[in-house]
Amino acid sequence: MLFPLRDVIPPRTAPVATWALIGFTIVAQLALFPRAHLVLLAANMIALRIFGENVEDQMGHGRFLGFCVVCGATAALALTWAGPFPRLEMPGTSGAVAGVMGAYFVMFFHSRVLVRLPLVIVEVPAIVFLALWALVQVLGSRPAALYGPASGLLAGAALIRWFRRPERARWEWREG
C-alpha cells in the first residue's frame, strides 16, 4: 500500500487556507452527501494537503482561495456541460483539487513526494502521485464525472500565471 506523506518542498508560510478548505470540504461533503464515495474524498483531501500548501505559499492565502473557487467553478460548469450525473459528491471538489495539482506541476514539475510503503519511506516523482490520484478519480467516478477533474487540472495549469505572486517565485523569498 502506497500512502503519501508530504512533498519535499517546505512552505514558508502556514497553509491556513489549505487547512480551512480541507475542514470545510469534509464537513460540507458529509453533511450534504453522506453516501459519497469516501475513498475519493480522502484522496482529494490528501492531495490538497500535500500540494495545496506550496501553491498557497506561492499565491498568498486570499489568492489561493479565489484560485480554488475558480477551478471548482470551472469543473462544475464542465460537469454541467457534460450532462446529468448522480449527485453523490460536491461537483467542484475534485476540480478545485485538480486545479491545485495543475498549478503545482507547472510550478514544481521536478518535485518529489515522500510515500510510505509497508516497511520504508521513499521519494517518488510528484508526477507518479498525480497518476495515482487520477487513477482514483477514474475508478471512483462515472465517465461523465471525469470532466470535472480534467477541466480543473487544465484550469489550474493555465491560471497559475495570473494568481501566483511573482515576488514569491524567487529563491531569495523562499530562503527568507
Image: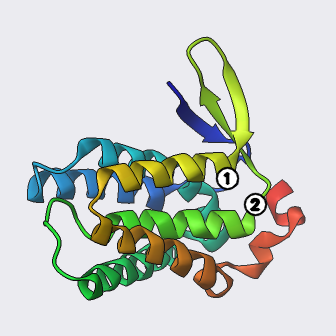
Residue type, numbered disc 1 = Ile
Q: Which residue is mark 1?
A: 127
- Asked whether the beta carbons under mark 2 and mark 1 sit within 8 Å of each other, the answer is yes
Which residue type carries mark 2?
Phe
**What residue is at 10 percent from the left and 54 percent from the top?**
31
**Closest to the observer, 153 or 170:** 153
Cα distance between the residues tagged 2 and 1: 8 Å
Quadrant location of residue 161? bottom right
- Indicate the secondary structure of the residue bearing disc 1: helix
Which residue, given by chain and number where applicable, does mark 2 sit on? Answer: 109
Task: Look at 28% across and 82% down and name the residue there.
Answer: 82
User: Hey, which residue is sitting farthest front in the picture?
Assistant: 143
Q: Residue at x 62, y 73 (%)?
A: 59
Task: State the image coordinates of residue 17 (x, y, percent, origin top left).
Answer: 45, 61
How many numbered tags mark residues here? 2
Dot 1, crowdedness within 10 Å: few (<14), some or many (≥20)? some
Mark before the other along the chain sequence, 2 or 1: 2
Farthest right residue in view = 172
